[in-house]
Structures are given as structure tokens and as C-alpha cells.
Amino acid sequence: MSHDGECDPRVARSKAAILDATMELIGERGVADVTIEAIAERSGCAKTTIYRHWPSRTPLLVEVLETITAFEHDPFTGDAVGDCVKALRAMRDRYSEPGYRRATIALLAEVDRDEDFKLLFDRFRLTRRAIMREVLLAGVADGSLAGAMDIEETLDLLMAPVFYRSLTKRSLYTDEALEQITRRILGV
């Protein structure tokens, strides 16, 4: 066990409760109105417990932003279309969760007001794009995708419909629709 109790199941439970409460509050109130007091009340954890893991509100909000913007993906298979569809499916599934969707909308609103959040969100957005960029570059390299493709524009075209529909319409693309969109954009 580490010196700070990181392997203790109680620590893991309290951290999860704090992160969940923070995400819920961001979705309900927006970033500006989320306080440590409100997080403590919602999570059922003492303020001292929160401060033990995060020295201030900002690092806690950063971790929630990391949770929202991150998504897991399967290892690449070498099939550019299939790998893009898998990445888009993971993105869709993440944003289909109501708490993530509400918190993302609130954080996006904060990005317009706070330069630090904008820089932070850009960093995480670029990390997510890097996953799909690798897939596209591998497809160009192996000849399965057109070599003249503008990678950055293609990334925008692939990700935008999923992001937009997930956050505004709340209706999700099916796996089949994601494949059709991907094929149309990639021209395969």
C-alpha cells in the first residue's frame, strides 16, 4: 500500500464520489458556481477529504475535465475505417451518458469565459484527436486512404457530427450510421 492510502478501497470510493458529485454539480450549475462546500455536501465527503486529494478547486475541475474528454479505445487493427468507427463509437458512448453530456456543455460554456479552461480543453481535445490522427496517417501510409487527404479537416469532419448530435439533439448515431458517415468522409 502506498503511503497516502491510494490502494485503500475507502480512498477509491471517496475519490469516485467526489468526482461524480463534481461532475453532477458542473452539469447543474456550471463551473463558476461549483464550490468545495457543495461538492462535500453532494458527495458525503468532508472538505478535508477533498483537500487531501486536490489542493484547490481547480485541480479537481481539471481532473473532471480529463474524465470527460478522455475515452478508451481498442488497439488499432490496421483497418482505417473500422478503427475510425471504433473511436467514434467510444466518443458517442461517452457523450451519451447524461452526466458527461451536461458537464461537457457546462465546461464548454466556461471555455468561452476562462482562458485557462480554454487552454486545458484544447490540450485534451488535441489528445483525443491524436488517436484518430494516427489511424488516418496509417491508412494513408498503407494506401487504404487517399494520400491527398487533409488530415486535420478530415478529423473535424469525422468528429463533429458525433459531438454535435450527442450534445444538442441527444439522439445518437447507430453503429451502422457511424460507418456510413466514416466511409463517406474518407471516400471509401
Image (cartoon, rainbow, N blue to C red):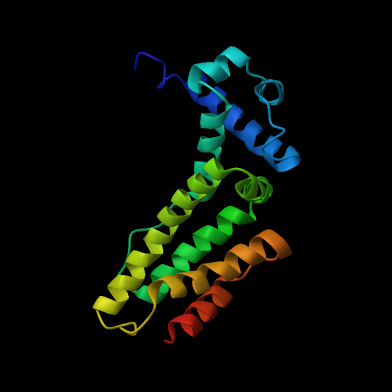
Estimate the x, y position of residue 182 in percent, counting from the top left: 49, 77
Estimate the x, y position of residue 43 in percent, counting from the top left: 66, 25
The residue at the point 65 percent across, 23 percent down is 36
Q: Quadrant of residue 149?
A: bottom left
Q: Residue furthest right?
A: 28
26 to the left or right of 144: right
Q: Residue furthest left?
A: 142
Estimate the x, y position of residue 102 in percent, counting from the top left: 69, 48
Estimate the x, y position of residue 5 in percent, counting from the top left: 41, 16
The residue at the point 53 percent across, 26 percent down is 15
Quadrant location of the C terminus in the rendered image: bottom left
125 to the left or right of 151: right
Q: Is residue 40 above or below residue 33?
A: above
Whether residue 63 is visible, yes or no, is yes
Quadrant location of the N terminus in the rendered image: top left
130 to the left or right of 35: left
Residue 70 vs residue 97, the one in the foreground: 70
The residue at the point 24 percent across, 77 percent down is 141
The residue at the point 56 percent across, 53 percent down is 94
Q: Quadrant of residue 140?
A: bottom left
